[in-house]
Image: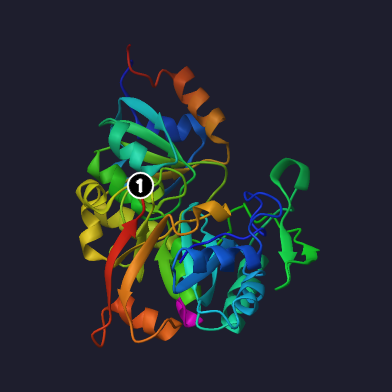
Amino acid sequence: MHIHSTLSPCTELGDMTPRAIVRAAIDKGLDMIAICDHNSSRNSGAAIRAAQGFPLSVIPGIEITSSEETHVLGLFPTLTMARAAQEEVYSRLPGANDEKAIGYQVVVDECDMVEDLEQALLIGATTMNIYRVVKLIHDLGGLAVASHVDRSGFGIFSQLGFIPDDLELDALEISKHINFDDASKKYRQLSNYTLVTSSDAHYVSDIGAAYTEAEMAEASFDELALAIRGDEGRRIIKPSRLV
Amino acid sequence: MAQMTLADLVEALDLTVSAGAQDLAKEVTGGYVSDLLSDVIANSKEGDVWMTLQLHQNIIAVAFLNNLAGIIIVNGRQPEEATIKKAEEQGVVVMCSSLPTYEVAGRLYQLGVRRET
């Protein structure tokens, strides 16, 4: 539910292309993935199209950096909604990318052909605080998941100390670097939330390194939303990782 | 260090007080600088004045939890409304400076806000 593409400047150039991501996800036996680049969803559409005809469902997403420098995943029911979120993010994301210093932000099509080089500073922080980020995601029908909550960089516990009661996150993602039991012991607030885990893959070889098992009628956004909320018999079975 | 209160810091650094103006008589016994709230919870000490650029209302809970003397928000940033409200509720003093963290901390140190090591 959290895979970066070649649009994120922290990935290797030419590694995380839509076709390569789709191929690796299918090889690893995943039924559903989400493309969540830093502060942009420009490659989500290409990945969705690249997966057409394959047994893989691709959710359009975006990993938004709040003003407190926490990372929040927005998973959306449609590409239109993801694009709307991206527009809002772009309007509140200061700075321009420096390709030599930070890396190329490559926008590609479903055939892995380069379409554009994104010039916004995607690794920067937006001026939206975390409440506003969550509200933006919800207003567009999306799911808001706090990214890698156990990580010291950009994780919500590191940045904010604890999760405020009135922040309406749909789920928390624990990273592949920690197992479920250790995470639960370390962060008592985890028991109040639905937990998922994902690879946060920046390299093709990382795809599937962590995954989440869920009971759903099909691999669709609506079913995922039910599973995360634990409605209608759908549920997240467990966050897992490959060791 | 010589005994110093928040009121002394407000005057010396020309801070604006956003919340807790009635509590400026609190004594300051040290200072702490960090923008990771988890780190502040772990390492700040009672009586510290905490310099940060975080504006989120969790800063109030952290200051309350560790019994800090007060918070100085740096760099001309303004605390969020919810943060001010929470500060008033919990009796946490929030002050603001137009200076960056380095300058604020340097001036406090010069004034004598430091622990004997």
Residue drawn where x is 76% and y is 58% of the image: A119
The part of the image, by quadrant, that contains residue A190 is bottom left
User: For the residue labelled by badge 1, is the local secondary structure a helix, a strand or a loop?
Assistant: helix
Relative horizontal placement of residue A100, taking residue A163 as reference (left or right):
right
Relative horizontal placement of residue A167, taking residue B95 as reference (left or right):
left
- From the viewer's side, name the closer residue of A90 and A171: A171
- From the viewer's side, name the closer residue of B24 and B50: B50
Residue drawn where x is 29% and y is 50% of the image: A179
Q: Where does the image place residue A180, in percent across and percent down from the top left?
A: 26, 54
Q: Is residue B105 magenta?
A: no
The type of residue carrying mark 1 is Ala
Q: Where does the image place residue B86, in percent across and percent down from the top left?
A: 31, 57
Q: Where does the image place residue A115, in percent across and percent down from the top left?
A: 79, 68
* Badge 1: residue crowd in 10 Å (few <14, some 14–19, many ≥20): some
Q: Is residue A139 magenta?
A: yes
Magenta-drawn segment: A138-142
Q: Main secondary structure of the magenta part?
A: loop
The part of the image, by quadrant, that contains residue A193 is bottom left
Q: Where does the image place residue A76, in percent across and percent down from the top left?
A: 50, 78
Q: Taking A215 as reference, is B37 above or below it?
A: above
- From the viewer's side, name the closer residue of B35 and A171: A171
Position of the N terminus of chain A by quadrant: bottom left
Q: Give the labeled residue for mark 1.
A: B21
Q: Taking A156 as reference, is B69 above or below it?
A: above
The part of the image, by quadrant, that contains residue A174 is bottom left
Q: Taking A52 as reference, is A19 above or below it?
A: above
Q: Is residue A185 visible?
A: yes
